[in-house]
Amino acid sequence: MNDVALKNIMAEPIQRNKVEFWAATTIYVFSLFSLSIDYSPNEFYFQNTNLVFHYYEHFFWPQLVRFTVVYLAFLLLNFKVAPKLIHRESVWLNVLLVLAAFVAVGVVTGITDTYYKGYLITKYDYVQEFWNYTFQSSFQNTLRLLLVFGFYTFIKYFGLYLLSNSVAIQSKYRMVTQDLITAFMVWLVSVFILVVFDVGEEITAVWTIVSLCAILLYFFSFYSLIPKSLAAKRPLLSYELRVLLVLVLSYLPAALLLLPMLHDEDAAFGISFFNALFQLVITAPATWMLYQRQQKGKEEVYVLKKELGRSAANLDFLRSQINPHFLFNALNTLYGTALQENSERTAQGIQMLGDMMRFMLHENHQQKILLAREIEYMRNYIDLQLLRTSASPEIVIETNIEEVLDQKYIAPMLLIPFVENAFKHGISLKQKSWIRISLHCDQNKLYFDVYNSTHKKLENDPEKDKSGVGLKNVKQRLELLYPEKYELIIRETPEEYFVHLTIEL
């Protein structure tokens, strides 16, 4: 069951009630189907007491009535009475309904037992004694069923509470997941059903201990045994040895838990041995296979998310740029015009801008480019900005960018957004401003710092609340392209803005 479906069942009582209703109805139908088999376990006792056994009179009809009454009582208590008692609605009325259901089930099962257990009448001198014993036993069994139902109700609502708070619980206890809580609730419900329909002590004991141990071993292996075994030279063998040790240690406790249920020491230790063998041969290998499949699926999902994220990031970045084809053609025209008019500064600026556009057109789409080309693009951008700011003595631009001669590669357009952001938010033609940019390479590590002044934006400035050009995009690309291989530190005050970026190339 996925998380969405689980939350819907937990949050929607109608959906949860449907699940319980159809589960109870399915069990009821299967119980009725078992009556159609022409076999009765109490026939043997009638024959031993030399009483005539009639299948329908002494087995079919008594059991049919018993199953039907228990089924109807469960529906009443589970869907009508228990929810109102939990919410403290009409308390006394619902308490009376509980007592009425108890009396009704006790009386009806007592009457049916006078037929079902008719062979016991030979043990008593008077019929009244037989009836007293039968009705006393039926009310004792009904009380036991009522207590089991109360335990089931408590576990159900407690489990729903745990599921609703599973995120907070898992933050403290990593192994206590929604799946574990759900599996434990299903186990409790299954044990409750086996007890209610009295399928036999041995069957109930085997299912109780084997299924519970399988659930616990599965989750313990997933979150502890398997992860610890992966570091070994032979992970599977290491895992199996760990499981074997756990099963050896749990053999005696499991047998001791079975003793009160079976009242037979040999049977308890025998079932405990069968449980250990089952977990070693079935549960442990199945858990290993499921873990490997899950890890493979996680790797595939991670790769897909990474590729999708890279594609989305690149697409967002490209969308944020002006179409370079149009600008490149226009710049050629402007460059020729500036030379004809002897505007050297203008021609120089257009030439640098043209180089930048060539970079964007031909190299920006590649996954990796030479670091030297990224630096060249950044220099052109800075020089272009200097043409705009060099006339103002209040603006200081300092750069300390090392030449990179080695064949080092980097994802394109990772550094320039920080420089663009510095010029966009750090330069004011009316106030004293400064920008300091440094870049240094040490073996395979790149150290890049941008330090600039900041100025308070006017209230009517459309760029007032914007964080900068491409910063969000470049953070996303760093996480996708250099996971656990970069460090980005950003500090901001009302007067200055500092960026430190380290990348392992």
Image (spheres, rainbow, N blue to C red):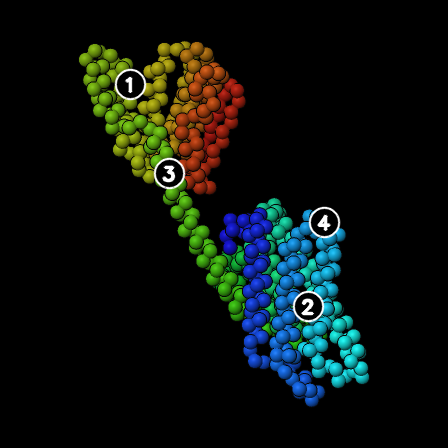
Residue topped by disc 3: 312
Q: Residues within 10 Å of mark 4 (few under 14, many from 20)?
A: few
Cβ–Cβ under 8 Å for marks 2 and 4 = no
Q: CA distance from mark 2 to mark 3?
A: 57 Å
Looking at marks 3 and 1 on the same chain, the residue that comes earlier in the sequence is marked by 3
Looking at marks 2 and 3 on the same chain, the residue that comes earlier in the sequence is marked by 2
Instruction: Indicate the quadrant where residue 66 lies.
Output: bottom right
Which numbered disc, 4 or 1, marks the residue closer to the eye? 4
Q: Nearer the viewer, residue 213 or 156?
A: 156
Residue topped by disc 1: 349
Cβ–Cβ under 8 Å for marks 3 and 4 = no
Q: Is residue 441 above or below residue 268?
A: above
Which numbered disc, 3 or 4, marks the residue closer to the eye? 4
Looking at marks 3 and 4 on the same chain, the residue that comes earlier in the sequence is marked by 4
Q: CA distance from mark 1 to mark 2?
A: 86 Å
Q: Residue at x 48, y 60 (%)?
A: 290
Amino acid carrying label 4: it is: Ser
Which numbered disc, 1 or 2, marks the residue closer to the eye? 2
Amino acid carrying label 1: it is: Gly
Report the residue that reaches farthest toward the bottom. Answer: 50
Residue topped by disc 2: 257
Looking at marks 4 and 1 on the same chain, the residue that comes earlier in the sequence is marked by 4
